[in-house]
Amino acid sequence: MPIPHHRIWFALVAVLPCLLPAVAVAHKHGPTGTYTEWNWPEAPANPDGKVGYRDFHHRLTIEATPADTDEGYFWSHQVALKDGETAYFGLQTLGYQRPDGSRGRVAIFSIWEALAARGPGIAQRFGGEGVGFQTLIPYNWQVGRTYALRMFKCGESRRGTEWTGTVRDESTGVVSVIGTITVPKKWGYLDSWSVMWTERYTGREVLKCSDLGYARARFETPTANGGQITPDNHRNYITEPANCPNSRVRDVTNGSRQEMGIPK
């Protein structure tokens, strides 16, 4: 089962603990998280003897974002590595500081307790609620456009097993590498459970539910091992207790739609 308050870090060149959601929770009007949890068939054994899936892939369409450009939302697919730790990959509204000081949209890929990372953008260690490595790239995703995100085993190195995160713009077909992260060799591959969620991770203090900017995204049903395997089942739910009633998650064709800050 996922933990209601995720171990998520917001990177602005240096990695900072994501403290703002905790501040908001101190008030009875904190944001209510939305989740779609996927249960997969029993993970297969691979030729190298390790158990687990070699890749997870899903499509994400962000359908609405807050008018407040300083309000940060994160749409993520959180996964687990057998005999190892947690990873996530997804898109954020804010997460990259430009030379002029403004903040831009990013694609992000992180793994806890990883050994190393490299990539075309930021590739660095994080700390706070646990440690690990994360990679980020500036990525100007567009509202209403669909993006395919993938995490896959890409090879072995002297130090460990390497996993890569990518994002593909389904309108143009262009694939962008977010980064590659090395994990201990003793870890297995992807486990038979994952969860997709939306988080408001930064913005003005939430004193009343109407302070939450409206965000809506459609997560499509994920696949594994090159699209050959789909989950057995799933369930949608929200954080309990629900601090604000203006969050919702429900099934749509081939996936789920998650909303936070629904206007009255």
Image (cartoon, helix red, strand yellow):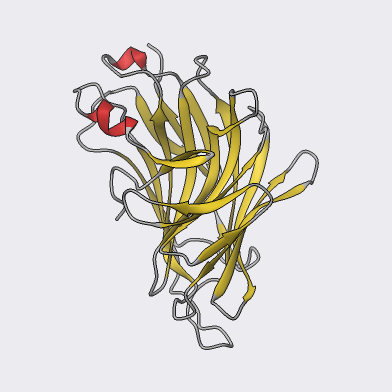
Classify residue 10 as left or right of residue 122. left
Classify residue 226 as left or right of residue 112. right
Looking at the rendered structure, the number of numbered marks drawn on it comes to 0
Residue found 47% across the figure and 28% down from its top? 72
Residue found 65% across the figure and 55% down from its top? 119
Give how far across and how far down residue 92 sits, in percent. Answer: 53, 36
Residue 181 lies, with reference to residue 90, above or below; the image says: below
Q: Quadrant of the C terminus?
A: top left
Q: Quadrant of the N terminus?
A: bottom left
Decide which of 231, 152 is in the foreground and name it: 152
Give how far across and how far down residue 70 sits, in percent. Answer: 48, 20
Decide which of 38, 117 is in the foreground and name it: 117
Residue 10, image quadrant:
top left
Residue 209 lies, with reference to residue 255, above or below; the image says: above
Residue 135 lies, with reference to residue 23, above or below; the image says: below
Give how far across and how far down residue 251 sits, in percent. Answer: 45, 40
Give how far across and how far down residue 220 sits, in percent. Answer: 56, 46
Residue found 62% across the figure and 55% down from its top? 179
Residue found 32% across the figure and 32% down from its top? 21
Residue 211 lies, with reference to residue 182, above or below; the image says: above
Decide which of 197, 135 is in the foreground and name it: 135
